[in-house]
Image: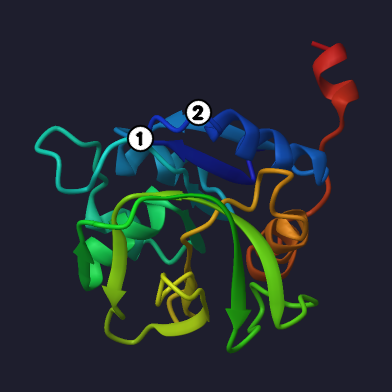
Amino acid sequence: MTQIIVINFGSQVAHLINRRVRELGVHSDLVPFNISIEKIKKLNPKGIILSGGPTSVYDKNSPRIAKKILELNIPILGICYGLQLIGKHYGKVFPGKLKEYGKKQISIRKNGVLLKNLKKKQQVWMSHGDLVKTLPKDFEILAKTDTCPIAAMENSARKIYGLQFHPEVVHTPKGMQILKNFVFDICKAKKDWSIGNLAAK
């Protein structure tokens, strides 16, 4: 059974996100951005991860998701472009005059569940143009950087979370801890997968 689905918005590291979840021992699948609500309901995942992507949410032909996906009462984690899609649905996203690519340090204001077991200062990997400057209604800022006011945010009631940085890459040293927090503590997924599952097929 697929426990986590990773919705692919064209990020070079979408496959890596999927692999990281499997490294946690949880069955996950990479699915296209135009996956239907009906297919998601049929898969019945415990959590959804929205991957990054190379386009801007302002681009006319940029990949989108239906807002109904955000209303399925399934925990959601938006990464980079995924965060901006959440921001576009619930708040405002601003075209970034500041293109960020590389190592940054976040300051954690509130750990919550998503950033549990992380110290207040953490190195992360940023790769984005646009950014969410206005906090969406009913969301709370978890972390920021000197140039990015919303580096991590949450709506714990709806179980919708967002990261402007990439937890799946090695340049975010505590990224696996963040994914672990989401997969196990928020989604309540169970370990059910190993590399041996592939060999058995």
Judged from the image, the secondary structure of the residue bearing numbered disc 1 is: loop
Q: Quadrant of the C terminus?
A: top right
Q: Which residue is mark 1?
A: 54
- Other residues around mark 1 within 10 Å, as few (<14) / some (14–19) / many (≥20): some
96 vs 23, left or right, is left
**Residue type at tag 1:** Pro
Disc on the earlier residue, 2 or 1: 2
Percent position of residue 189, x then y: 72, 56
Q: Are marks 2 and 1 in contact (CB under 8 Å)?
A: yes
Rendering quarter of residue 85: bottom left
Q: Which mark is residue 12?
A: 2
Which color mode does the image show?
rainbow
Q: Quadrant of the N terminus?
A: top right
Query: Which residue lies at the image location 40% right of the left edge and 77% below the top edge?
Result: 149
Judged from the image, the secondary structure of the residue bearing numbered disc 2 is: loop
Viewer-closest of 60 and 199:
60
Query: Which residue lies at the image location 67% right of the left edge and 74% below the top edge?
Result: 115
- Other residues around mark 2 within 10 Å, as few (<14) / some (14–19) / many (≥20): few
Percent position of residue 48, x then y: 51, 51
160 vs 37, left or right, is right
130 vs 3, left or right, is left
